[in-house]
Every structure is written in structure tokens, then in C-alpha cells.
Amino acid sequence: MDQLVIEGRHPLKGTIRISGAKNAALPILAATLLTGGTFRLQNIPRLVDIRTFTDLLIDLGVTVDYSTDNDSDFLNIDSSGLSDHEAPYDLVRKMRASILVLGPLMSRIGKARVSLPGGCAIGARPINLHLKGLELMGAKLRLKEGYIEAKAGRLKGAHIYFDTPSVTGTENLMMAAVLAKGTTVLGNAAREPEVIALGQMLNQMGSKIKGLGSNTIKIEGVKKLRPVDWKIIPDRIEAGTYMMAVGAVGEELIIEDILADHLEAVISKLRSTGLQIEGDNARISVRKKGALHSVDVTTLPYPGFPTDLQAQIMVLMALAGGLSVITETIFENRFMHVAELRRLGADIKVEGRSAIIKGVKGLNSAPVMATDLRASASLVLAGLAAKGTTTISRVYHLDRGYEHLEQKLAAVGARIKRKKAYLIR
Ligand code: EPZ
């Protein structure tokens, strides 16, 4: 398994361009199952999770190929040849977002056999709300050998209320509702930009969805949809991660190809730590002037502070000048990075859903291990700040969600390189 080797304390200076958002691309890839014909998708990030998803689509009989048209990359997808309806355990196990094929398959062919995703490092992450919504729309579900077997004639519109806002739950049920008979209302729906982007593409395909971005989404079922060209929105979590890299090690970065409107909670919080953030919606500068102030953070569904940046901001608080409390309200086990940060000298105590962080003068390098995608990003930030050389193992976690991370950081002054670990046969 590859490792990242980082020589710390080299301040960053330069420009980083943000890639397309993984969590916008995945539901949009699933939505190509809703109708035959060619979708031309642009700004799809080259990530392991995207590859896993396109492998799943190919297994279902979908044609997938990359093309370049006056130096823009396109991912072309055509599900006319859809010939299967199963998302196998070994794919869903690797990437739980595979469950996003459930809604579109139920809409297109009225049947699906999808492996239950199983456990995940950051929490139980059940899919009960996805399944309850499908049943309310008339699907017959049964659990057999770890698979959900779903059958339905044409789904019918229903009023579905989410106990808690679920991003992929909202996305799955939106895709189940677009071809249903009648109107579906999703109450307490997720408001994330990635959910809005999916809904906007579905509307361009001929759907009738209203209320995107609010917590009540109304979908009037239609009979037919058509394929479209679509550009994936920038990755707000990748952007937030690089903004926090400036907080970890200084000095200044220009972050391009973003939508700063998607980062209001993050920008506001980072400004209160003392980082100077200026610019417009598509391009911002982040500058570190002096020591960071300690702030408290509570993760919340959008538009609150995103859980996917919790591990990263913890690194900044580990280096700030006082005491801060970070409360994780979305997932029940998303503090695995704490033990690793402690190995680097951070002073952090976990009490239930909160971590209490006492800022220290500096971190010191040590070998550490990534446990999940965003925890590994926090270890990179810590490595950039630590005195000495930090080695991070199991970086396959990182490759799932960050396109060309070490290249982007090395280009702005980080001393970071990947050590290929060859399997000794
Ligand atoms: C999406 O996961 C993201 N993944 C996650 O990003 C992100 O952390 C999460 O939303 C929260 O923002 C993708 O978009 C592919 P949820 P998702 O359903 O949809 C509970 C990353 O690092 N819940 O919004 O799986 C659940 O347990 C990943 O890119 C139920 O109880 O998250 C959690 O406590 C990590 N029953 C809460 O809702 C359900 O049926 C929010 O989960 C569904 C969810």
C-alpha cells in the first residue's frame, strides 16, 4: 500500500485549481441510468471512487468512455444497453455510494438487487430512510443474503419525511420520483449543493422538480427523460481542505475554480481563526497572518459546517492558541483521526460526540495511518505543519476523494512525495 512522505514546515505559496466534486459526480453518474442516449459529462474528477462507479455502470451494461473535445475532457455515458440490475457486494462494500443505483433502476426498470452497504469506519450509516421512501412509493422490498431485492411496477408519488436529512437518501428518492405516477414530496430533505446540482440536471433532462436547496422538495413525475450534457460543480470539500492547509503551515494560496457560495460556513469559521480570506465566487486568496485563534465548531447538515471538513479543522485547532471544542453531530464515530494526531503531539480529548483540543506550540513528525478519506486529509495537513518527516500509510483512502493531491501541494511548495509500496510476493 502506498505511503505519503511529507517533510514539514514548508509554507505554501501559489495557486491551486479545484477539481470537480466527487459527491456531485457520483449521483449524476447514477442518474444516467434513468434514460438511454448519450450523456456528455465534464469536469468529472479522476478518482478511485469515480472509477469504481463507472465499473459498476459497465457491469450493468452501460457504455462508458472518455473523449477530449478542444482540450476539455468528457465522460460519455449511454445506458441504452442496460442489461442488469444488480450492485454486487464487492463493489458496494468498497464504495457505499453504489446504493445510488437503487432509485434510478427502480424508475427505469422497476427492479434492483443492491447489496446492503455494511459497516463503515465513521459510523453505522444505515440506509433505512432510502428503503422506507421506496416502500412508500410502492416498491416491494425484501432482504435476502445481504442484498435488498426491490420490485415495483411504475412507482407512485408519495409524501416522504426524512427523520434526519440524508444526502444520498434525498438523491436516491429524487431519482425514484422523477418517472413515478403523480407527485412526491420529500420533507426534511438535504440541501447540499450536490443535491441541488443533481436536481438541476434532472430538470434539464425533463423532470419537474421544485424546492431544490430548501428542506421540502416537490417532484412531479413525468413519462420520459432525455440525456444531457452536464458540467460537474467544483469540490467544496477539496477547496476547504486546501484553505485549511494554509492555516496549518502558512503562507498564502490562491484557490481557483471554486464556488465560494458553497463555503460560507467554512469561510466564516476560518476567518474567525484569524485567516485572511478575500476574493470572489470563483477565486479566493487565503493568507495566514500570525498565530491562529481557537474556535468552537459543530458539524451540521448544509448550510452548516460540513462534517467532511471536521478532521481537517481539528488540525488547525491543535495548533491554535487556546482551547476549542469540536462537536460531530452527523456521524457517531468520526474521531478516528484523533489518535493519529495525538501521535504527532496534539493535545486532544474525546468526550462522547465532542473533542476538546488544547492548542500546542507545534506538532512533531511520526509514522501515522489513514483510517478514512477525510481523516487521511487531516493527517496530510498535520504532516505539512509537523517538524521533521511524517509518513502516512494506507493513503488509498486519500485516492478515493482527492485528485492529484501530492502534485497540487508540491506545486505550491510542499515537500511531499508518494512512496510506492510494492507487495513483496
Ligand atoms: C454523504 O453521505 C456524503 N457522501 C458523505 O461524504 C458526507 O459525509 C455525508 O453525506 C454527510 O454530509 C456522498 O455524498 C457520496 P447521509 P451519506 O445519508 O449520504 C443517517 C465523503 O467523505 N442516515 O447524509 O451516506 C446517517 O447515519 C463522504 O465524501 C440514517 O440514519 O450521508 C448519518 O448519521 C463521507 N438513515 C446522517 O443520516 C439513512 O437511511 C447523514 O447521513 C441515511 C442516513
Image (spheres, rainbow, N blue to C red):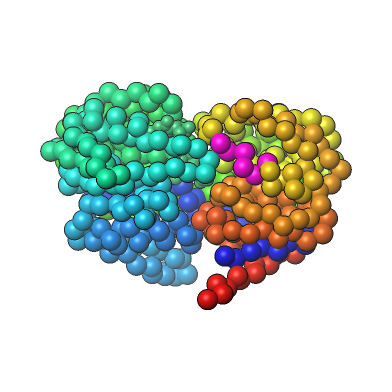
Across and down, in percent, residue 313 comes to 68, 40
Return the residue found at the far left.
Answer: 153
The residue at 40%/23% (across/down) is: 163
Q: Is residue 66 above or below residue 361?
A: below
Across and down, in percent, residue 344 comes to 77, 49
Across and down, in percent, residue 46 comes to 48, 62
Across and down, in percent, residue 214 comes to 43, 27
Left or right for 82, reference 289: left
Number of callouts in the render?
0
The residue at 24%/47% (across/down) is: 113
The residue at 49%/59% (across/down) is: 47
Q: Is residue 361 visible?
A: yes
Q: Is residue 108 above or below residue 138?
A: below
Return the residue found at the far bottom.
Answer: 425
Image quarter hosting the N terminus: bottom right
Left or right for 290, reference 219: right
Q: Is residue 274 visible?
A: no
The one nearer the camera, 15 or 120, is 120
Q: Which residues are magenta?
A: 333-338
